[in-house]
Image (cartoon, rainbow, N blue to C red):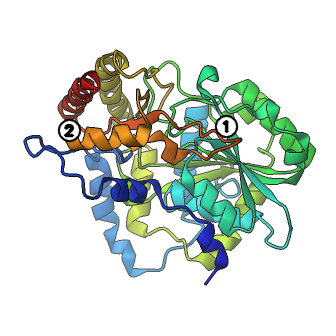
Amino acid sequence: MNPRLSLLQPYPFERLRQWLAGVTPNPLLAPINLSIGEPRHPTPALLLDALAAGSTGIAHYPMTIGTPALREAIAGWLCRRHRLPAVDPGREVLPVLGSREALFSFAQTVLDPTLPGQLVVMPNPFYQIYEGAAWLGGATPMPVSGVAARGFATPWTEVPEAVWARTRLVYVCSPDNPTGRVTTLDEWRTLFEQSDRHGFVIAADECYSEVYFDEARPPLGSLAAAQVLGRTGFPRLLAFGSLSKRSNAPGLRSGFVAGDAALVKAFLLYRTYHGSAMSPAVEAASRAAWNDEAHVRANRREYAAKFALLQPRLDAVLPCAMPDAAFYLWARTPIDDAEFARRLYEAANVTVLPGSYFGRAVDGVNPGSGYVRIALVAARDECAEAIDRIVNFTRSL
């Protein structure tokens, strides 16, 4: 067996399952699960219709590079969404089977398992896929802790030059999971400057980029930041996008990578051997999704209504800033976060995810400790019921 498998920590949801095992939740209350970030708004009919219509294509092997029509749909969306003058669909875009598998497998493309001491830098708290990708790619994960006093901004300017010199890959999540924070233009400038100096690659995880609350202020994306800063060709940068959150289609397993043509070419070579071609039926649904924005705006309106109603209600007992984007509330707990989640489950039959499960201790401090992540993904009434239960439980502590 690969000895590096022993370096992987249990996935947060498995940790939570084990932590709650043996706890009997209140039988008088229906269960409400706000722990997992699985969109539960209805999948748009246009996707389902296109998926069904494209099913005849499964009689043929698909191409790993995807069809020109799909790459053109993605490139067109990128130009419209991020105000880019041009994205080359043949060289700068590649369809993937959801952003999660691509974020993991991309590390296997850029890391050199024969190179000792290489680092993969990532925010802390973070999405655990980054850590696993680093370990299994032969590198060491290097979490850089954000702190509450700075709104959980990752302090990129405080990373020592000696760390940057050993870095091969940097993961950036914007909008961030679990905090909902968006990376600023100045922060992108810092990362790009260090990438130019040390040659590392940046993987920008933007799967939450289309869940935001003000139509006039979409979150800044990495490709847009590169464009503003005059970085023609997006050197050493790939953006990772997904239809899971944008179009309420997590089971479709459809996304893209876009950016530096040399990185796209190398990743395509890897994926050709990895066996990561997208089904023609999924391609058809994906084209329909990327070419339509009406369903995405409707989705945002529903999230905006939920957050406007429920964030102030929760903030009154569990401090939780309104996120810049994404569908999470990152709430501070009055007791240990894991204990809070366990006792909440027992008393109110509501499941939330302890923030410490997202973080790693650096200098003895886990920046996720004392927080829980609450995913407002269910229907408005169910989310409202859950928040009411959390409020009542917290006041009883």
| Looking at the image, residue 51 lies above or below residue 60 | above
Question: Which mark lies nearer to you, 2 or 1?
Answer: 2
Q: Which secondary structure lies at badge 2?
A: helix
Q: Residue furthest bottom?
A: 1
Q: 265 above or below 375? A: below
User: At x 60% / y 29%, what residue is drawn?
Assistant: 152
Q: Mark 1 is on which residue type?
A: Ser
Does residue 69 appear anywhere in the picture? Answer: no
At a point 32% along the width and 69% down the height, the residue shown is: 55
Residue type at the position of mark 2: Ala
Image x and y of residue 215, in percent:
45, 21
Q: Please identify the quarter of the rendering in which residue 65 is found.
A: bottom right
Q: Nearer the viewer, residue 327 or 329?
A: 329
Q: Is residue 108 left or right of residue 349?
A: right
Of mark 2 and mark 1, the one earlier in the sequence is 1
Q: Is residue 307 visible?
A: yes
- Judge the density around disc 2: few (<14), some (14-19), many (≥20) Cα neighbours within 10 Å: some
Please provide percent x and percent y for residue 220: 61, 29
* Mark number, residue 169: none
Q: Can you say whether 326 is above or below 98 in the image?
A: above
Q: Which residue shows up at 24% across the image and 52% down it?
A: 23
- With respect to residue 135, does 392 lie above or below? above
Give the quadrant of the C terminus.
top left
Left or right: 72 as drawn, with respect to 335: right
Label 1 neighbour load within 10 Å: few <14, some 14-19, many 20+: many
Instruction: Name the residue beneath numbered marker 1.
Output: 145
Q: Nearer the viewer, residue 295 or 307?
A: 307
Where the N terminus falls, by quadrant?
bottom right
Say which element carries label 1. strand
Q: Which numbered marker is on residue 347?
A: 2
